[in-house]
Image (cartoon, rainbow, N blue to C red):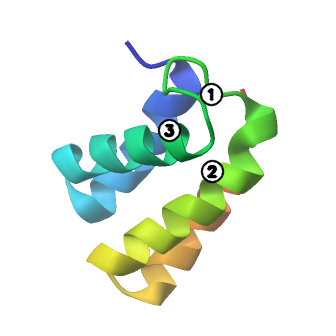
Amino acid sequence: MANALARDITRVLSDALGDFIASATVKKNCELLGTTPEDITAEQLPALSTGIEKSVTFFSDSSTAKTIGEKVRAMKA
Protein backbone atom coordinates (compact mmCIF):
# COMPACT_ATOMS: atom_id res chain seq x y z
CA MET A 1 0.00 0.00 0.00
CA ALA A 2 1.26 3.48 -0.89
CA ASN A 3 2.23 5.89 1.85
CA ALA A 4 0.18 9.01 2.63
CA LEU A 5 2.25 11.20 0.32
CA ALA A 6 1.72 8.88 -2.65
CA ARG A 7 -1.99 8.66 -1.86
CA ASP A 8 -2.23 12.47 -1.83
CA ILE A 9 -0.42 12.72 -5.16
CA THR A 10 -2.69 10.06 -6.65
CA ARG A 11 -5.74 11.93 -5.39
CA VAL A 12 -4.59 15.15 -7.11
CA LEU A 13 -3.93 13.26 -10.33
CA SER A 14 -7.25 11.39 -10.17
CA ASP A 15 -9.20 14.61 -10.51
CA ALA A 16 -7.61 15.23 -13.90
CA LEU A 17 -6.84 11.72 -15.19
CA GLY A 18 -9.04 9.21 -13.41
CA ASP A 19 -8.04 6.67 -10.78
CA PHE A 20 -6.36 4.06 -12.98
CA ILE A 21 -4.10 6.43 -14.91
CA ALA A 22 -3.31 8.39 -11.74
CA SER A 23 -2.13 5.27 -9.92
CA ALA A 24 -0.10 4.08 -12.89
CA THR A 25 1.48 7.53 -13.30
CA VAL A 26 2.59 7.67 -9.67
CA LYS A 27 3.95 4.13 -9.79
CA LYS A 28 5.88 4.64 -13.03
CA ASN A 29 7.37 7.98 -12.01
CA CYS A 30 8.43 6.55 -8.65
CA GLU A 31 10.13 3.67 -10.48
CA LEU A 32 11.98 6.16 -12.70
CA LEU A 33 13.37 7.74 -9.51
CA GLY A 34 14.41 4.35 -8.15
CA THR A 35 11.73 4.20 -5.48
CA THR A 36 8.18 2.97 -4.99
CA PRO A 37 4.91 4.64 -3.95
CA GLU A 38 5.42 2.98 -0.55
CA ASP A 39 8.81 4.63 -0.06
CA ILE A 40 8.48 8.06 -1.71
CA THR A 41 9.65 10.96 0.50
CA ALA A 42 9.10 14.70 0.50
CA GLU A 43 12.71 15.18 -0.59
CA GLN A 44 11.90 13.37 -3.84
CA LEU A 45 8.90 15.55 -4.67
CA PRO A 46 10.72 18.08 -6.91
CA ALA A 47 12.04 15.33 -9.19
CA LEU A 48 8.77 13.41 -9.02
CA SER A 49 6.72 16.48 -9.91
CA THR A 50 8.81 17.07 -13.03
CA GLY A 51 8.17 13.53 -14.24
CA ILE A 52 4.50 13.74 -13.38
CA GLU A 53 4.15 17.00 -15.32
CA LYS A 54 5.56 15.29 -18.42
CA SER A 55 3.22 12.34 -17.94
CA VAL A 56 0.15 14.51 -17.45
CA THR A 57 0.98 16.46 -20.61
CA PHE A 58 0.63 13.20 -22.53
CA PHE A 59 -2.94 12.70 -21.22
CA SER A 60 -4.04 16.33 -20.84
CA ASP A 61 -2.99 19.87 -21.68
CA SER A 62 0.17 21.65 -20.52
CA SER A 63 -1.74 24.04 -18.26
CA THR A 64 -3.26 21.15 -16.31
CA ALA A 65 0.14 19.46 -16.14
CA LYS A 66 1.77 22.59 -14.77
CA THR A 67 -0.96 23.04 -12.15
CA ILE A 68 -0.62 19.43 -10.99
CA GLY A 69 3.18 19.73 -10.89
CA GLU A 70 2.89 22.81 -8.69
CA LYS A 71 0.49 21.02 -6.33
CA VAL A 72 2.87 18.06 -6.02
CA ARG A 73 5.88 20.32 -5.35
CA ALA A 74 3.89 22.11 -2.62
CA MET A 75 3.09 18.90 -0.71
CA LYS A 76 4.66 18.02 2.59
CA ALA A 77 5.12 14.59 4.12
Rendered residue at 56%/72% (across/down): 67
Q: Are marks 2 and 1 in contact (CB under 8 Å)?
A: yes
Rendered residue at 62%/42% (across/down): 33
Rendered residue at 29%/44% (across/down): 24
Rendered residue at 61%/34% (across/down): 34
Q: Position of residue 64 (x, y in %)?
A: 44, 78
Does 48 sit left or right of 76 as displayed? left
Q: Quadrant of the N terminus?
A: top left
Q: Earlier in the sequence, mark 3 or mark 2?
A: 3
Question: Dot 2 lies on which element?
Answer: helix
Does 29 sit left or right of 71 as displayed? left
Question: Dot 1 lies on which element?
Answer: loop
Q: Residues within 10 Å of mark 3 (few under 14, many from 20)?
A: some
When the figure is inspected, residue 12 is found, relative to residue 36, above or below; the finding is below
Relative depth, front residue between 68 and 53 = 53
Q: Residues within 10 Å of mark 2 (few under 14, many from 20)?
A: many
Q: Earlier in the sequence, mark 2 or mark 1?
A: 1
Farthest-out residue, bottom: 62
Amino acid type indicated by mark 2: Leu
Q: Distance of mark 2 from mark 1, alpha carbons?
A: 9 Å
To which quarter of the image does residue 41 belong? top right
Q: Position of residue 51 (x, y in %)?
A: 56, 61
Q: Which residue is mark 2?
A: 48
Amino acid type indicated by mark 3: Glu
When the figure is inspected, residue 64 is found, relative to residue 32, above or below; the finding is below
Q: Are marks 3 and 1 in contact (CB under 8 Å)?
A: no
Q: Which residue is mark 1?
A: 40
Q: Which residue is mark 3?
A: 31
Q: Position of residue 54 (x, y in %)?
A: 50, 72
